[in-house]
Amino acid sequence: MIDVYVEKCRDDIEIPKYANSGDAGVDVRSAIDMVIELCETVVIPTGLKMAIPLGYEVQIRPRSGLSLNTPLRIANSPATIDAGYRGEIGVIMTNTSTFWEEEDNVLYTLETKDNAQGTYEIKKGDRIAQLVLKKSPQMNLVEVESGYVETVGINRDGGFGSTGVK
């Protein structure tokens, strides 16, 4: 286990903990109530600050149930919290809803199922993402002459879906 120091920076915040032995991530919760409109991107504060050891990062990743059941997406997944960052951790979330399924004044919650399209309400304490600790060695970037990179290792070419879907 690696020590990561966690500090509460808002009232009534729960320190994340692993739900089960062997889990890769800990669930992080919203520190405030918030409404996310259609096609809106927001930063949801967690009320937490961390001191991450050098050589590591903490990644913010989606919770699978949230991604399956709602149109809410973590916009920059996985997000990286660098070892040198000491500010409050926020989760960038986008409501990818593009139309209303119900009346305009319906507010869906994270308990809503079937990817209901519309405005979503996040409540303080809702589990919105997960945090995963990862090793992150720094790269030594060595500038080389033009054409050299193609001669190192195997060049399989392609990329961006070049291998197809089947």
Image (cartoon, grey):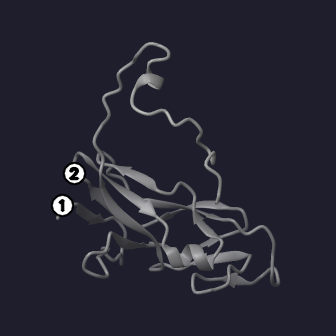
Which of the pair 132/123 is nearer the observer?
Answer: 132
Residue under the image location 31 percent in, 55 percent down: 134
Q: Quadrant of residue 145?
A: top left
Q: Which amino acid does label 2 sit on?
A: Pro
Q: On the image, numbered disc 2 is attached to which residue?
A: 53
Residue 166 placement (x, y as % from top left) = 64, 60
Residue 149 placement (x, y as % from top left) = 45, 24
Q: Is residue 137 above or below residue 59?
A: above
Which of the pair 13/27 is nearer the observer?
Answer: 27
Q: What residue type is labelled 1?
A: Ile
Q: Circles 2 and 1: CB distance less than 8 Å?
A: yes
Left or right of 77: which side holds 72? right
| Element carrying mark 1 | loop
Residue 118 placement (x, y as % from top left) = 74, 76
Residue under the image location 82 percent in, 84 percent down: 103
| Element carrying mark 2 | loop
Which of the pair 67/7 is nearer the observer?
Answer: 67
Q: On the image, numbered disc 1 is attached to which residue?
A: 2
Q: In this view, does 62 lie above or below 125?
A: above
Residue 51 placement (x, y as % from top left) = 25, 55
Residue under the image location 46 percent in, 60 percent down: 90
Q: In this view, does 86 lie above or below 3?
A: above
Q: In which quarter of the image is residue 104?
A: bottom right
Which of the pair 74/49 is nearer the observer?
Answer: 74
Residue under the image location 58 percent in, 86 percent down: 111
The disc, 2 or 1, on the residue closer to the chain's N-terminal end is 1
Neighbour tally class for label 1: few under 14, some 14-19, many 20 plus, Cα within 10 Å:
few
Q: How many labels does the image show?
A: 2
